[in-house]
Image (cartoon, rainbow, N blue to C red):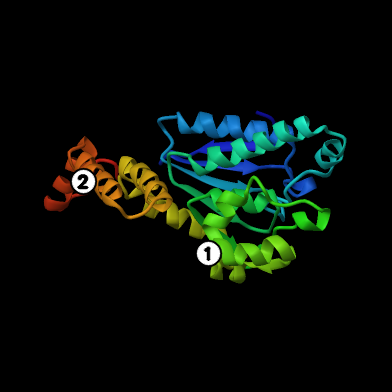
Amino acid sequence: MNDYLLTQIDDSGVATLTMNRPEVHNAFDDSLIAALIAELRRLETDPRVRLLILAASGKSFSAGADLGWMRRMADYSRQENLQDALQLAELMKTLDGFRRPTLALVQGAAYGGGVGLVACCDMVIASHKASFCLSEVKLGLMPAVISPYVVSAIGARSSRRYFLSAERFGAEEARRINLVHEVVHPEELQARGAEFCRVLLGNGPCAMAAGKDLVAAVARGPIDEAMIRDTAERIADIRASDEGREGLTAFLEKRHPSWVKG
């Protein structure tokens, strides 16, 4: 990993992954995409990590594609473009499927693929100064590989507007269309992120991972007998697990469960 990507894991198990290319507004190219994928996979297998914060240094969260990268892509063959797109798709899939809770702290502009990163996180807190734009059509392109995650976050109706208009919109509009969960003053962003982490750390780690998987499964299919059976199986499994038994016992004994430190 290079200086363009910084990782810190604190004593409580909060991993902060920071994009660190402020001079280019944290735009990403093929090398940064590969580094992000590798670091996300490493953090997912680190037993110390209980949740992940995705952040960025400087004024912008991410401007999307790096200009130098876009210039190189202009000369790519279709096959080279396909391989390049599949790598970005792998980044989105890896972040979306990260087995611990993910929290994005958005301090500034998020454009193009930067919106994709935001949409892939479980929870998003943004500064009032944050802004968003799906700008691809201005370049004669479209937000293709990020679309499954953005459409899932904001719905088809808002996606039609912002995919086609490439309008820039602010943090309050992002909250209205469900891209962002909370909007705070810039000076409160880090503190609110830390407060939210404390809330998450009070929850069962395995239960939260199972909850993420549950949402993905339920969102994909109809409410039929197979889904009803699947959800019943899931709760039966987790009730019988060590963590489930510990959580229920702690509640009945009026004490903190074992995963709560201090």
Task: State the image quarter where residue 84 is shown.
Answer: top right
Q: Quadrant of the C terminus?
A: top left
- Where residue 160 sits in the image (x, y, percent)? 64, 64
Q: Residue at x 44, y 56 (%)?
A: 196
The answer to whether residue 179 is visible is: no
Q: Is residue 22 left or right of residue 150?
A: right
> Along the line of sight, which residue is nearer the eye, 211 or 84?
84
Quadrant of the image containing the N terminus: top right
What element does badge 1 sit on?
A: loop
**Identity of the residue drawn at 81% across and 53% down:** 140
Q: Name the mark on residue 98.
A: none
Q: Quadrant of residue 136?
A: bottom right
Instruction: Determine the CA span between mark 2 and mark 1.
Output: 31 Å
Q: What amino acid type is highlighted by mark number 2?
A: Gly
Location of residue 159 in the rendering, given as x and y in whole percent from the top left corner: 62, 62
Whether residue 240 is visible, yes or no, is yes
Circle 2 crowding by C-alpha within 10 Å: few under 14, some 14–19, many from 20: many
Vertical comparison of 123 with 28: above or below? below
Precedes in sequence: disc 2 or disc 1 = 1
Q: Name the side, left or right, on which 191 lies relative to 68.
A: left
Number of numbered markers? 2
Q: Position of residue 82 (x, y in %)?
A: 72, 34
* Residue that numbered label 1 is attached to: 178
Q: Secondary structure at mark 2?
A: helix
Q: Residue at x 64, y 58 (%)?
A: 107
Image depth: mark 2 or mark 1 in front: 1
On the image, the x and y values in percent for residue 7 come to: 58, 36
Residue drawn at the location 34% of the way across and 43% of the way down: 210
Q: In the rendered view, tell whether residue 203 sits above or below residue 80.
A: below
**Foreground: 34 or 136?**
136
Q: Amino acid at mark 1?
A: Asn
Label 2 sits on residue: 247
